Amino acid sequence: MARYRVLTGLDYPPNKRAEIGDIVEDLPAQSVKWLLADGHIEDADKPKKVVAEEPAPTPAKKAVEFKPDAKDGDKDGLVQDATIHERPVEEK
């Protein structure tokens, strides 16, 4: 008998409830095709689908005035940190 992993909470006949992560074998046969297609269930005998997370967006850099003589106030080797003019400290 086919086994399905529930991906969204489901109510199904006769008066049954399956929660996310449950493995069920008694879903109505006429519903399995659309439940699979809509992503409500997946085949429990196949490896779980792994969805790669998108990396967090890089914060936008501030648009500020360019300062040719900017100082490295926090001593991190960069001047005008987190701005569109961020650059390494120039060696003199």
Image (cartoon, rainbow, N blue to C red):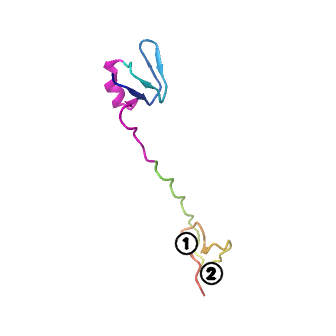
Q: CA distance from mark 2 to mark 1?
A: 12 Å
What residue is shown with label 1?
A: 85
State the image coordinates of residue 47 (x, y, percent, origin top left).
Answer: 38, 38
Q: Give 76 or 48, whichever is nearer the viewer.
A: 48
Task: Indicate the position of residue 51 as horizontal and vertical percent values.
Answer: 42, 44
Residue lying furthest right: 73
- x, y (%) of residue 25? 39, 21
- Please state the extent of the stretch shown in magenta in the rendering: 28-52
Q: Quadrant of residue 83?
A: bottom right
Which residue is painted at 48% across and 19% down in the image?
Answer: 17
Q: Does the magenta segment cover residue 38?
A: yes
Secondary element under disc 1, as helix, strand or loop, is loop
- Which quarter of the figure is the N terminus placed in? top left
Asked if residue 48 lies in the magenta stretch, the reply is yes
Quarter holding the C terminus is bottom right
Earlier in the chain: of badge 2 and badge 1, it is: 2
The residue sitting at 46% across, 16% down in the picture is 16
- Mark 2 is surrounded, within 10 Å at the Cα level, by few (under 14), some (14 to 19) or many (20 or more) other residues, namely few
Furthest residue to the bottom?
Answer: 92
The numbered dot on residue 69 is 2
Q: Residues within 10 Å of mark 1 (few under 14, many from 20)?
A: some
